[in-house]
Amino acid sequence: MSELTFYTNPMSRGRIVRWMLEEVGVPYNTEILGFGDQMKSHAYKSINPMGKVPAIKHGDTIITECAAICAYLADAFPGANLAPPVKNRGLYYRWLFFAAGPLEMAVTMKAMGFEISPDKLRMAGCGSYADVMRTLEQAVSENQFVAGDHFTAADVYVGSHISWGLQFGTIEKRQHFVDYLGHLSERPAYKRAHQIDEEATKQLQAAS
């Protein structure tokens, strides 16, 4: 198996990929980068020209962007059973990339205090925040998991957004969101990932 390296910071979206890696269950190396000089260094920009985490390197393959990393890992390690068969991937792709596009865009704009005027909604890929919340609620309430009755990489990504949104108040605290996150957070891989990143955060804070 090719070596797998994970570039992250425990106080970043890298937590999404950490959870995904723990679900995959294969050995990986972790390189923790500080915000600022380390992420913007020439060495790391050869991995991600944006100078942001997370990223992974699997052999000679480099992947950035959380949704892409989740999708890649599900395909690269099919034994983990984290993606449906190709013929059954409609909901899987739909909700994975809904979260990467409209959901993240709407939540970020709300957190920054931006509001799209009604006459500009058609220009915004996310539409209105209310539409996004209503659609997200549909995604997590129709089945046990977003792609049906089986846990997939899409649940890692969607669940991570809901977790952060509920924690920081950028996603409305609706019961369907709470219930969905509740059963995801009982997964052993979720708990392992959370513990690893909490310990890494404490080490960074102690060193600063």
Image (spheres, rainbow, N blue to C red):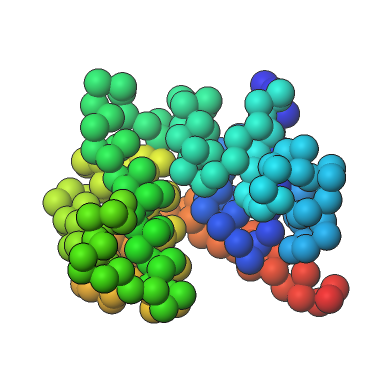
Q: Between residues 191 and 60, which one lies in front from this camera angle?
A: 60
Quadrant occupied by the N terminus: top right
Residue drawn at the location 83% of the way across and 60% of the way down: 37
Quadrant occupied by the C terminus: bottom right
Left or right: 85, with 118 as reference point: right
Residue situated furthest left in the rendering: 142
Left or right: 78, with 147 as reference point: right
Left or right: 71, with 27 as reference point: left
Residue drawn at the location 53% of the way across and 25% of the way down: 76
- Let me know if residue 150 appears in the view: no
Looking at the picture, how far across and down is residue 51, in whole percent? 71, 51
Left or right: 179, with 113 as reference point: left
Work out whether 113 lies above or below 192. Answer: below
Looking at the picture, how far across and down is residue 7, in whole percent? 70, 47
Residue drawn at the location 52% of the way across and 53% of the way down: 16
Work out whether 41 lies above or below 186. Answer: above
Instruction: Using the rendered view, name the quadrant where residue 83 is placed.
Output: top left
- Let me know if residue 172 appears in the view: yes
Q: Between residues 108 and 152, which one lies in front from this camera angle?
A: 108
Residue drawn at the location 51% of the way across and 59% of the way down: 191
Looking at the picture, how far across and down is residue 38, in whole percent? 82, 56
Looking at the picture, how far across and down is residue 181, in whole percent? 34, 63
Work out whether 127 lies above or below 2. Answer: below
- Total marks drawn? 0
Residue situated furthest front in the rendering: 119
